[in-house]
Image (tube, rainbow, N blue to C red):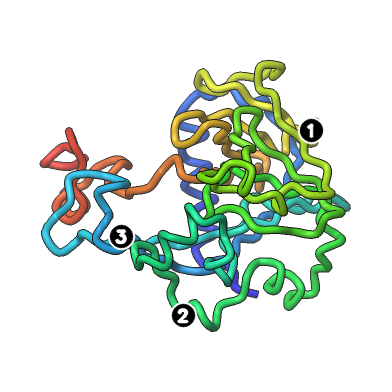
Amino acid sequence: MRVLSGLSILSLLAGVYALSLDLKIPSSNATVDVRVFNVANGSIVNSADTLFAPILPGRETANVPLYSFLIEHSQKRLMFDLGTRTDPQNFAPSVASLFTSGIIQLEQQESFKDITELLQDGGIPLTSIDAVIWSHSHFDHILSFSNSTELMIGSETDTRTYPTFPNATLQTSDFADRKVTKIDFTKANLTFSGLNAIDYFGDGSFYLVNTPGHLPGHLTALARTTPTTFILLGGDTFHHVGGGPPTTPLSAELPMPRASPGGV
C-alpha cells in the first residue's frame, strides 16, 4: 500500500488556511481518517500549455501524480477519486487516443497497480467501500469499481457514454448495474467562502463542496482530521504550485501571471 509521506504536512497546511480564513465552518469534534495513494505518475508530453501558462523553455512537458483517497469514518469507508486504469487503451476512444498518440504517458505503465489492487494488497476488501466519489469525470480520477458500491458525482457531470455518443469520454461500463447518486448542491444549507457545501456524515467530519470551473460537476472535499485541522481534497482545482502564495524561488521556477516578483 503506497501512502504519501507528506500527508501530515498537508493536514497542517490545510489547518493553517482554515484558521486564517474565516470560512465559517461549524466547529466539531468528529473527525475522519484519510489515507492517500499515489496510484501512478503521468506526463503530458510537450503539452503543458493545455494546463497553465506561461511555460518556461524546457518545461513543455508536465509531470503529474495521480492520487486516490480512502476516507474512514466509524464503520464507513469512502473512496474520493480513483486514479487511472492500468490499460488506458481500453478507455473510450476519445481518451485512449491521447495515450496511443503519446500525448499522455504513464510512468512504468506495465508494472503499476490500480487502486482496486492496492486496496486489496493492503487488506481492504472492495466490498467494504460504501461509496466512491468522483471529484470529476476525467480519466485520471475514475475507474470501474465493484458494482455493489454506490457512485456519487456532481449533478452537472456529463454522463453521456460511448458508444451511444462517439466522442464521449465515459463508457457504459462506468455506470452499469450500480447506484449512481447525483449530488445536488442547490439543496445545500452550508456555504464556505461563497461555495455551497454538504455535510456528508451530518457531524462536521467530512464536507463536499461545489467547485465548478475545471469541469461541469466538479466538487472537492474538506476532511476534518482533528477538531481544528482539515485536508482539502481538491480534485483538479489546483494544477500548478505557482498558483499558491508566491515566493521568489517559486516564481522564478514556475512563473504565474501577476505573481509578485519579490515574493511574500
Q: Which secondary structure, mark 2?
A: loop
Q: Residues within 10 Å of mark 2 (few under 14, many from 20)?
A: few
The reply to whether dot 2 and dot 1 touch (C-beta < 8 Å) is no
Q: Is residue 141 left or right of residue 101?
A: right
| Amino acid, disc 3 | Ala
Q: Which secondary structure, mark 1?
A: loop
Question: Farthest bottom residue?
Answer: 111
Q: CA distance from mark 2 to mark 1?
A: 41 Å
Give the labeled residue for mark 3.
62
Query: Where does the image place residue 125, in percent across and percent down from the top left?
Result: 83, 68
The image's mark for residue 108 is 2
Location of the C terminus by quadrant is: top left
Q: Is residue 210 left or right of residue 239?
A: right
Q: Which secondary structure, mark 3?
A: strand
Query: Where does the image place residue 155, in percent across and percent down from the top left?
Result: 66, 28
| Amino acid, disc 1 | Asp
Query: Where does the image place residue 129, in percent across and percent down from the top left?
Result: 81, 56
Residue in the foreground of this view, choosing between 90 and 232: 90
| Amino acid, disc 2 | Gln
- Residue 103 sits above or below residue 2 on the image: above
Give the labeled residue for mark 1.
203
Query: Where does the image place residue 37, in percent across and percent down from the top left?
Result: 59, 65
Q: Can residue 229 be spotted in the picture?
A: no
